[in-house]
Image (cartoon, rainbow, N blue to C red):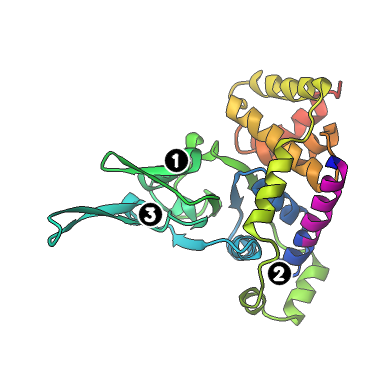
Amino acid sequence: MATQNAELASQQLDALVQSLSLILLGKPEAIKLAVCCLLARGHLLFEDQPGVGKTLLSQALAQSLGLQFRRVQFTSDLLPADILGASIYDREAGSFAFHPGPVFTQVLLADEINRATPKTQSALLEAMEEGKVTCDGVPHALPVPFFVIATQNPSTQIGTFMLPESQLDRFLMRLALGVPDRAAERLMLQGEDRREMLRSMKPFMSWSELAKWQQIARQIHVSEPLLDYVQNLLAASRSSGQGLSPRGGLALLAASKAWALMAGRVMVLPEDVQAVAVAVMGHRIAGGLAHAASLLEEVSIP
């Protein structure tokens, strides 16, 4: 039964990836990693130059899963209350009433998140970690599921603020899209407008189906030698300064399980860890993507 479920999940998730690939051309690997991130119940960060499809893919992910979606354009004058909500005095009731902000949704697109000040960026920390926000000392639960899909421009661009390490660590993956290859770009230039295609896109999978695959992904078997391999990667990342936190290790394992399920397997293999490692580790360690890739070469498979 477990094998049948894994095969069925693999077929359905692969079809989802193919559907999204019609919206964003020439980026099947990035799309597969993005689906893997949501399957592992993680938040996703896209970092790249403007105009490569970060926002388009974010919207397509939410729409394909039929989830409630809100977008917040982050700017330098955005305040935490603009995201979380605020308590406003009601004259008739003679008391304050909480008015929820756009964070109260299932998928929040934080567009150009690094154009907001660090104070505003940090407003999402509690929401991303605990699935709730606190206003005036009162906690308010967020909808289930709750995903943050954020985009950010390169830090070298004018008007950007560096994301703090605590914020970066709450994103399961950071992905870069890059420009499409020549063949994909030609199809894009000749074909239908991608925004028009997005408007007519129907939900490909229900939330209950996604929740089912998420639960199965958490149950994927991990052997003792595989755990040794993951721990060796964690230790190697910490040997030269800033390395992976325990949360980063859990993130790497969760993403590896999700990738294994997408491949139709009921146990994690080293190649599953290697497939997701750079996306999971690159924003968490000094040296970034290059260091993360070098760790995979340095650490041998048990």
Q: Amino acid at mark 1?
A: Leu
Q: Is residue 68 above or below residue 235?
A: below
Q: Residue at x 61, y 38 (%)?
A: 283
Q: Nearer the viewer, residue 142 or 243?
A: 142
Q: Is residue 202 above or below residue 258?
A: below
Q: Secondary structure at mark 3?
A: helix
Asked if residue 11 is among those painted magenta in the image, a careful observer would answer yes
Q: Quadrant of residue 15?
A: bottom right
| Segment colored magenta | 3-15
Neighbour tally class for label 1: few under 14, some 14-19, many 20 plus, Cα within 10 Å = some
Q: Amino acid at mark 2?
A: Ile
Q: Which residue is mark 2?
A: 23
Q: Quadrant of residue 196?
A: bottom right
Mark toward the start of the polypeptide (2 vs 1): 2
| Left or right of 136, for residue 277 | right
Q: Which residue is mark 3?
A: 83
Q: Residue furthest front?
A: 1
Q: Residue at x 66, y 73 (%)?
A: 201
Q: Which residue is mark 1?
A: 125
